[in-house]
Every structure is written in structure tokens, then in C-alpha cells.
Image (spheres, rainbow, N blue to C red):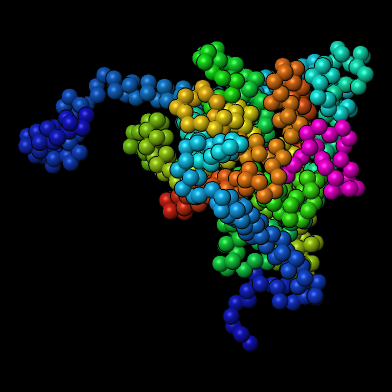
Amino acid sequence: MSTEPIDLSRNGNDVGTIGDRLARYIFFGCAAVTIATTLAIVLVLVNGATDFFSTVSLTEFFTGTDWSPRAADNPSFGVLPLVWGTLMITVGSALIAIPIGTLTAIYLSEYASSRVRRVVKPTLEILAGIPTIVYGFFALSFITPILQQIYPGTGTFNAAAGAIVVGVMIIPMVSSISEDAMSSVPDSLRNAAYGLGATKLEVSTQVVLPASLSGILAAYVLAISRAIGETMAVTLAAGALAQVTMNPFAEIQTMTAYMVEIGTGDASVGSIGYQSLFAIGLTLFVMTFLMNVLSMWIRSRYREEYQ
Amino acid sequence: MSTNTDTSTTTTTTSTTSTGGDPDGFDPDGDDFDFDGSSIKRKHQLGTIFLGLCFAATMVGIVALVALLADVLLEARGWLTLEFLTYPPSQIAENYVPSNYGELSTGPGGMYPMIIGSIYLIILTAIFTLFLGVGAAIYLEEYAPDSGLTRFIEANISNLAGVPSIVYGLLGLAVFVRAMQTGASLIAGALTLTLLILPIVIVQSQESLRAVPDSMRQASYGTGATKWQTIRNVVLPEAVPGIMTGIILSLSRAIGETAPILMVGAATTMFTPPDLTDPTGSFGAMPMQIYEWAKMPEAEFQHVAAAGIVVLLTILLLMNAIAILIRNKYDKRS
């Protein structure tokens, strides 16, 4: 008889009826759907973009500063104005969500009592559960009128309102993930700092923050990735005028807003408008994919392991 | 402080050799010792300011939430009527004004077909995600070997969760609507939403399965049960509450998604609800209609959009309440 220990985790794997083996294949099939989804996304985007780039040169697309696909005589497909619009929303919302989200996380993790935390954290997470279309409405009916009172030149559609609502939307992403990272810093580190005479402020900013930096940075990157792909709120709030401008109170168009514009109008299959959807979609997918990979890399590269 | 340290170190080591020369340069007789407590006071003040900042930041999120809900409710007040829930939409703003209802030849405007459309959409999405999501989670938790392929599948799932929803819309448009020729139909919308929420459902179902203690599996194997029998009779019943909670919460995300169904081609002014027995027919859904209303220039449509949002948020709230009820009910038992 073998003296090797019995591998309990394999129990039942080898025995069983045809039904048992069938179950395994069916469940594998379900998991394989996720791989098929990724493959399909890449194939669909690359396929559509290839059609697009057979008409429009890569140079024109990536370096052109004029996006006017509708122009009847001489349509122009320079993606930079759309990328600029997306960038304005992303940077603006990050400027709002990163400081607010980080301070919120510090408050919840270091200062708030567990009772306060149990109420506040889920309340903030409601923000992440509200449909983005509602944020778009909120921007139009609440934020923009306020901006117009502060700065009368504000248009009905403007980048600032879009950035503000997207910023609010991603606050819980920054705060929740950062708070999780801060809470997992062991108390022994805090107590050691207190023992040296550190104040709560010093413990929070010089011990807890550096110790949970990987989780916090990963949260930032995820939130930014979300802001890049955000669609309905920016479509309603920021408008549909593709232009490169420094003025946050002017109308802009993001990549996603352009996709909505084409998606609601009936662009016929094979038209350059329809094909441009996939070129923009591919650009968007690559940008968010890189952000997601970066977030995963930060987490695994800089993770501090605590017992 | 740090500039003082260098000079005090040299004086300490030269004058009082008996103390052995403190390497930190701490000098009990020096000026940097804080007798009056002013530096401690300053630190306390800084600490209070910082706490104030942190608290204020926390309040920003809460105030924004309150402002958003108050804004929607105030705009919707007086516009959300029973007729709004039971009549099809209209392109004429006056038809939505409750005081006009009596004089209309066409009947009041509402969002009935979209409410039904959204419910059908969610029912179909629920069926697809239940099978695919739970199936994939069972494979990954119960069957999958610790191999490169498994790690690849899991990394792929977490990446899919970060793909923008409008890209899923493009996928649905190209694969379901065009390639499979389902048209801009209920089934295309439901399949697209299924793929969108599948990563979240899988991860949450995996967590529920992982929470089932291994001792229960071993006990089942000990009675001679096969793997599938163990999963079906022991693991799944134990994990069902967690799985259901996860699925309902994901569905409540799906019901509010606009971009994917917009790309798939959800209709905006549908006068009759879609037919569940014919899932290839066209469909309307609440968020799509709200978008259509919100971008109308007339002021009336702002109120109509707000009324639509209140209906959508109420359904969301109900779904979340059900999820919490399920969780609490089964949490107490354990």
C-alpha cells in the first residue's frame, strides 16, 4: 500500500458517472464564455477598425486635430479632439475624486468609529450604484445652472459639469478600495509609531499611507480607467462638439459621447461613420485595458504582505 | 529642527562625554527641547485641521448624494402620476403635464412600455447570468486545477470587469444584432447586458462558494457522494443566498445601463411593450427613454425625465432591498 497522504482535494474528481464528467465540461464551457467574450471584443474592434483604416490613414487618425466626420465634401478624421475631450473629463474628475476619495478613506479607516464607518461606507457606495444617466441629468439640471451663476459664460453643455459629476461618481471607487487597503495595515505598525510619540496625523500620513500605497494607487488607476470609459453622464453634460480647448466651460465631445452620437443615429453598416465606431472603440478599449493592467501590476509589484 | 541637530550633536559629544554622546543629538539643555509645549500644540492644531479636512471630504460625497436625490425628487414632484406609469410616451411635451390630462385627445404621456421592456430585459438577463455566471464560478472554485489556464481565465475576468460598458454595446451590435441577425431586439439587449455583468456575477459567486467550509465537502465525499452530487446537494444550497445577493445587485446595475442597449439599438418612442414570447422584436427600456427625455430642449421634458428617474431609482431600491433581505435572512441562521 502506498504511504503517500491521500489528496483529499481531488476527491470525487476521478470517479463518477457520465453525468459527473458532463457537469465538469458544462461548467468549463461557462467559464470559457469569458475568454470567448474577450476574443470577440478584440476581433470585433480590430475587424471594424481595419475597415476604417483602409479609408483613413493611421497618421490622419492619430495626429489629426480636426474631427468632422459629417462634413459632406471633405470629412476629416483626426481623433485628437475626442481624445482631448476624454482627457479633460478624466483629469478634471481625477482632480476631484483623488483628494476627496483619499481623505475620505483616511477618515473612515483612521478616525471614524466602526459605527460611523458602517453607515458612511455603504452610503457612499450608493453613489457608485446610481445609473450614470442620472448623473447626466443631475449635471444638466443642477451643476450647470450653478456653474452658470458663478461663471456666466458657461454653456448648456460644458466640460466642467461633466468632470464634476464623473468625479463624484468615482469618489466611492477611490475611497472604498483605498479604505480596504488602509484597514489591512496591521495595528502593530500604528502602535509602534504611537510608541515613538507620533501624532495621529503623522501615523495616518507617514505610516498608514505609505504602507497601503499600492492599494491606493491601484484604486486611483481603476477610477481613472472608469472615468475614461464613462459614457452617458458626459454625453448629457459635456455635449457633442469635438474641439481642442483649454476652457472648461466650453462644450466638448469625448470618445464615448461620439460613439453615442453615431449609435443613436442610424449609421448604416459599411458607412465610414459606422466603421469609425470601431476605431474609436478600439482606442478606448486599449486605453482602459492598459490602465487595468497597470492597476494589477501596481498591486502585485508593490504589495506589502502582512500577517 | 533638523538644522539645529548638527550643531547640538557636536556640542554634546565634546562637552559631556559621560553620557556617551547621544547619536540622535538629543540635548536636554538645548533650545530644541519643548518646555512650553508650543510644538506639541502646533501638532495638535495640525491634527485638528487634518481631521477637519478628512471629515469635510467625507461629507462632500454624502452632500452630493443628498443633492442628487433632492434635485431629482424636486424636479419630479407633481409629474409622477399613475398615468405616467400606465401610458405610452408622447413626443408632445404638453401631454405629460398632469393638469392637461383631461383635455387630451391622445391620452397622457408616460413610460409604461419602457417599464415593461426593462423588466423583460432583466428577466432574460437574469436567466442567462444565472446559468453562465454560476456555472463559471463552480468551474473555477470546484473543478479548475491550479494551472496557467485557470489563472489566465481569472485575470481575464478581472480585466473584463474594467471594460467600458459602451464597448460591450459595440460587441452586442456587431455580434448579436449584425452577425447573428437578431436585430435590435430584446434578446440582443439581454445577451449584451449578460456579458457586461458576467464578470461581477462570477467573482461574487466564487466568493460565496469559497465561503462554504471544506469540511462540508469532505463530509459529503465521506458518504460516498461524487463531486457533482456534492456540489448539487451540499455546496450550492449553502452558497445560494450569497449567489442570489450578488446576482440581484448585478442586475440592478444592468437595469440602469444605458450605453450598451443604446448601441444595440433600443427604441426610444415605443407605444407598446415588447412581447416576451417574441424576443426578436424591438424593445424600449427605461434608461434609454430617460436619456431621450433629458436631452430634449423643452423645460417640461426635464420634469418628465426626473419622473422617469424616480421610477428607475425606485425599482433599483426595491432590487437592493430584496438583496439585503436575502442576505440578512440567511446571515442570522448561520
- Asked whether, in this view, residue B55 is left or right of residue B64, the answer is left
Start and end of the magenta stretch? B259-284
Rendering quarter of residue A128: top right
- Asked whether, in this view, residue A169 is left or right of residue B319, the answer is left
Q: Residue at x 81, y 21 (%)?
A: B92
- Residue B276 within the magenta-colored segment of the rendering: yes
- Asked whether, in this view, residue A33 is left or right of residue A286, the answer is right
Q: In front: B334, or B245?
A: B245
Q: Residue at x 29, y 23 (%)?
A: B39
Q: In front: A6, or B13?
A: A6
- Asked whether, in this view, residue A234 is left or right of residue B43, the answer is right
- Figure disc tally: 0
The spot of residue B317 in percent (x, y) is 75, 32
Question: In this view, which residue lies farthest toward the front?
Answer: A73
Would residue A267 be visible to someone looking at this image? yes
Question: In this view, which residue lies farthest toward the left?
Answer: B14
Vertical placement of residue A218 versus B69, above or below: below
Q: Residue at x 49, y 25 (%)?
A: A248
The spot of residue B254 in percent (x, y) is 72, 42
Would residue A194 be visible to someone looking at this image? no
Q: In front: A7, or A228?
A: A228
- Residue B267 within the magenta-colored segment of the rendering: yes
Q: Residue at x 53, y 41 (%)?
A: A77
The spot of residue B216 in percent (x, y) is 72, 62
